[in-house]
Amino acid sequence: MLILVSDIHLTDTLHSTTVSREQTFERFWQRIEAARGSRPAHLCFVGDLLDLVRSSAWLESASRPYHEPSAALEAVIEGIVDRVLAREAGFFSAIRRRVASGGLEITYVLGNHDRLLQMAPRARQRVWAALTGREEAIDFGAEAVFPEHRVLAYHGHIGDPINSAPAQGATIGDAIGVELITRFPRLVRQLVGAEGAEILDDIDDVRPIYAVPAWVRHVGVVRGDLLRPVGETWARIVEDFLSKPFVRQWIKTQRSPLGFDPGKKLRLMLELSTKRMIIKGQDQRLTKLYKYLQHGFDGRMAERAVAELRSPDHRGLRYVVNGHSHFASMVPLGRIEGAPAAYFNTGTWRTVHQIGNAMGGRPSFLPFDAMCYLVFFPDGDPMGRDYEWWTGAMVSRRGE
C-alpha cells in the first residue's frame, strides 16, 4: 500500500492548524492500519513536509534562503530544523513508532519550502532520524517513482515561475516568503502591539502566493482599526522588496517582449495592493487580475503530468502525483496503452485562506483546515481497489 501526502509545512514559530499535526496523523493512521493488512504501508511526503523559508530566524540573521550556499546559511537551516523537530515532537514520534514496529516505510521528496535541506546534510540527517529512528546519511530527491503502482510523484513547483529555479536553486518565492510574508506581521505589531493582532498571522495561510496582496487589502477592510498601519507597513515593505538586488535581477530575467511575463504580473499585483484601500475600483481590478492568473495556473500542472507520462523515462507509468498548490484535485488524463491515466494533487494538511473571485468586487477569503491523502492498493486487494483519493475541509464558526 502506497500513501501520498504533501504540504504539511511544519514551522518553527508560525501558528499552526486548529487540530495538531500529531492528532491529525493518529486519526489518519487508524484508517491506514485497518486497510494495510499484513504488509507495511509506504508513506511518501511529496514535498514541503517542513517549511524552512517562512521562519523569523532569517530576519534575525544576515543570511536569507535565497542566498548562495555557505556555512552561515547552513547554520540557520540547522537551527530552524532543530526548532521544528522540538515543536512537532509528538508528530514525529507518532510516525517513528510505526516505522520501528515495521508497519510503515518512508520516502521524502523535496519541495520548494524544504529544498534547503539539500544544502544542509546534518539537518537532513536529523529529519530522517526523527521520522525513522535511523541515524544515517540520507539524500532526498526531487521525485520518486513507484513502479508497482505505476506512480510518479514530484512536488509540482517545477512549472511555477515564482517557486522554481534551475537545479533547485533560489526562487523569488523564497524572497516573498521572508521579506513580505514573514516580515509583515512583525512590523505591524511594532505599531499596534500584539493584542488583537492575531489576524496578521493568517498571511502565512494564503494560497496561492499570488493572492497575498489581495489578502492584505482584505485585512484593511474587515479590521478598520488596522487599516492605516497595515496599509502603510505593506506599502513600505513592498517598496523595499522591489528594490532588493535579488528581486530586481529576477524581474529582469523574466522579461519577455511577447506578453505578460511573470515579473510584470508580480510587480503589477504588488503595486496595485499598495494603493489606497478605500478605492473600490482598485480592489475589483486586483480580484479580476487574480482570477486571470489562477485560471492560467490551474491546468498547467496536469499538462506537465501528461508530458511526464509521455517521456520514455516514465514508460509504463499511469499516474502523476503533485502537491504545491494546496488545492486537492483529481484530473483524468485519458488512456495510456489502453488503461486510464490520471493526475492528482494531494492538497495540504494545513489551514488555507482561499480567495473568492467569482462574484467580483472586493477580495474576500474563506479560511478552512484542509486534509487530503491518496492511497494506492497492492494487487490482490480484497475490494479490488486500485486507488482511493480522500479530501476534506473543516470550517470554523469563527470565520462567519
Image: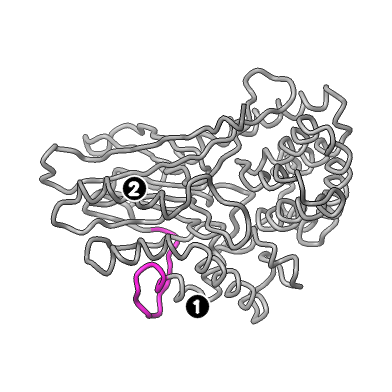
Residue 203 higher or lower than 224, as above or below: below
Mark 2 lies on a secondary structure that is helix
User: Which of 265/117 is in front?
Assistant: 117
Contact between labelled residues 1 and 2, with CB atoms less than 8 Å apart: no
- Residue furthest to the top in view is 359
Q: Position of residue 303 (x, y in %)?
A: 46, 38
Inspect the image, locate mark 1, and give the three-letter code of the amino acid beneath it.
Pro
Determine crowd level at label 2: few under 14, some 14-19, many 20+ residues with C-alpha closer than 10 A.
some
Going 64% across and 48% down the picture, which residue do you hit?
A: 204
| Marker count (numbered) | 2
Which residue position holds label 1? 121
Q: Is residue 363 magenta?
A: no
Q: Give the alpha-carbon distance from disc 2 to disc 1, as whole Å.
A: 30 Å
> Mark 2 or mark 1: which is in front?
2
Check disc 1 and report its element: helix, strand or loop: helix
Residue at the image point whose x is 17% and y is 49% from the top: 378
Does 350 sit left or right of 358 as displayed?
Answer: left
> What is the three-letter code of the residue carrying label 2?
Phe
Seen from the viewer's position, the closer of residues 117 and 313 is 117
Which residue in the protein does label 2 denote? 28
Dominant secondary structure, magenta = loop
- The percent position of residue 9, horizontal first and vertical second, equals 53, 54
| Residue occupying the point 71% across, 28% down | 363
Res 144 → quadrant: bottom left
Q: Is residue 177 above or below residue 375?
A: below
- Left or right position of 125 against 17: left
Q: Which residues make up the magenta segment?
A: 128-143
User: Residue 137: x, y in percent?
Assistant: 40, 79
Point out residue 346 in the picture as x, y percentages from the top left corner: 42, 43
